[in-house]
Amino acid sequence: MAAAKKEAAKKEAPKKEASKKDDLQAKFEAAAEAAKKAKRKPDNATLLKLYAYYKQALEGDVRGDRPGGFDFVGGAKHDAWSKLEGMSRDEAMQGYIKQVERLNRD
């Protein structure tokens, strides 16, 4: 009987993991919508954090060369995103959600 319970628990684990990922994805999408509807415009540092977490969550590590010349905004975005290199998709989603929560709390 104990073996049957262990086998059932093994089958449940992937379902719970998938459920957590679906829940995180839903929270991330809701946060993305909430960020668009913020009552006030965030400062540039917050915008860069939001951008970096969003890109890391959707695309993973930064690719390509850093924009140069007079593309200061592009360079700042690239730098912010590259600081998150190696961060997992789930961690980036959680970071994004926390940033949006702070934004809408203030």
Image: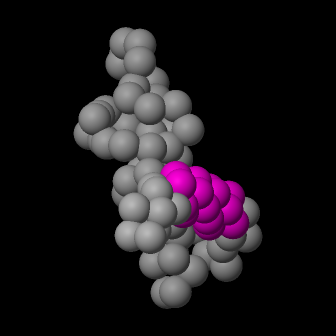
Q: Quadrant of residue 30?
A: bottom right
Q: Residue at x 44, y 70 (%)?
A: 1
Q: Residue at x 37, y 12 (%)?
A: 65
Q: Residue at x 52, y 86 (%)?
A: 105
Relative side of 17 to 80, left or right = right
- Confirm whether the magenta stretch covers residue 89: no
Relative side of 47 to 82, left or right = right
Q: Residue at x 67, y 79 (%)?
A: 39
Can residue 33 be seen at all in this image of the molecule?
yes
Q: Position of residue 88 (x, y in %)?
A: 37, 43
Q: Position of residue 103 (x, y in %)?
A: 51, 75
Q: How many marks?
A: 0
Give the camera-side residue of 96 and 19.
Answer: 19
Give the camera-side residue of 54 and 86.
Answer: 86
Secondary structure mostly seen in the magenta stretch? helix
Can residue 51 be seen at all in this image of the molecule?
no
- Confirm whether the magenta stretch covers residue 30: yes
Q: Which residues are magenta?
A: 11-32
**Residue farthest toward the bottom in the current orientation of the protein:** 106
Relative side of 45 to 9, left or right = left
Judging from the image, the colouring scheme is one colour
Give the camera-side residue of 21 and 66.
Answer: 21
Against 33, residue 53 (above or below) is: above
Give the camera-side residue of 44 and 60.
Answer: 60
Against 104, residue 23 (above or below) is: above
Q: Position of residue 73 (x, y in %)?
A: 46, 35
Q: Position of residue 94 (x, y in %)?
A: 44, 61
